[in-house]
C-alpha cells in the first residue's frame, strides 16, 4: 500500500517536471480495466488508448471516460501529453 502511494506521488512529480509534447499519431487500440466491485466495494473503470507515431513507436495512456468515448480507433491527429499524462487529442479531418 505504502509503495503504491510513493509510486503514484513519484509519477505525478515526474509528469509535472516533464515538457509538454505534441506529436502526430494514429489511434490503434482502446481498452478498459475494471477494479474492485466485490462485496461492499464499488468498481472503478480505467480507460486506456494506444497511440502510434510515425515510425511505429507506440504509447498507451490512461484517459478520461469522456475522451475515451470521443476518440475512435483509426483516428489521426495530434496527441498532447506531459510525461505519462494525457492532455488532449486533436483529430485531424482528412479530405
Image (cartoon, rainbow, N blue to C red):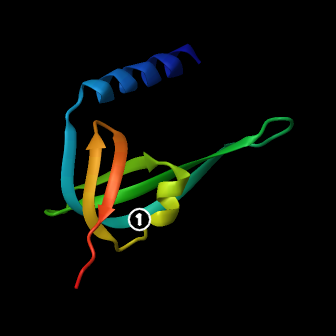
Residue that sits furthest to the left in the current view = 55
* Position above or below: 40 against 1: below
Q: Quadrant of the N terminus?
A: top right
Q: Disc 1 marks which residue? A: 29
Residue 81 position within the rendered picture, expressed as x and y whole percent measured from the top left: 29, 44
Q: Quadrant of the C terminus?
A: bottom left
Residue 58 position within the rendered picture, expressed as x and y whole percent measured from the top left: 27, 56
50 lies left or right of 69 = left
Query: Foreground: 53 or 77?
Result: 77
* Position above or below: 76 against 24: below
Residue 90's quadrant in the figure? Answer: bottom left
Residue 13 position within the rendered picture, expressed as x and y whole percent measured from the top left: 34, 21
Q: Residue at x 46, y 24 (%)?
A: 8
Q: Residue at x 23, y 30 (%)?
A: 18
Q: Residue at x 47, y 65 (%)?
A: 70
Residue 80 position within the rendered picture, expressed as x and y whole percent measured from the top left: 27, 49
83 lies left or right of 11 = left
* Dot 1 alpha-carbon crowd within 10 angstroms: few under 14, some 14 to 19, many 20 or more: some
Amino acid at each position: 500500500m505504502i509503495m503504491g502511494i510513493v509510486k503514484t506521488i513519484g509519477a505525478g512529480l515526474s509528469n509535472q517536471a516533464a515538457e509538454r509534447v505534441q506529436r502526430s499519431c494514429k489511434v490503434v487500440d482502446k481498452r478498459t480495466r475494471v477494479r474492485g466491485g466485490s462485496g461492499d466495494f464499488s468498481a472503478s473503470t480505467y480507460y486506456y488508448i494506444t497511440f502510434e507515431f510515425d515510425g511505429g513507436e507506440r504509447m498507451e495512456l490512461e484517459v478520461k471516460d469522456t475522451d475515451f468515448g470521443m476518440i475512435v480507433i483509426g483516428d489521426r491527429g495530434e496527441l498532447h501529453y506531459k510525461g505519462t499524462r494525457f492532455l488532449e487529442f486533436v483529430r485531424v479531418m482528412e479530405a
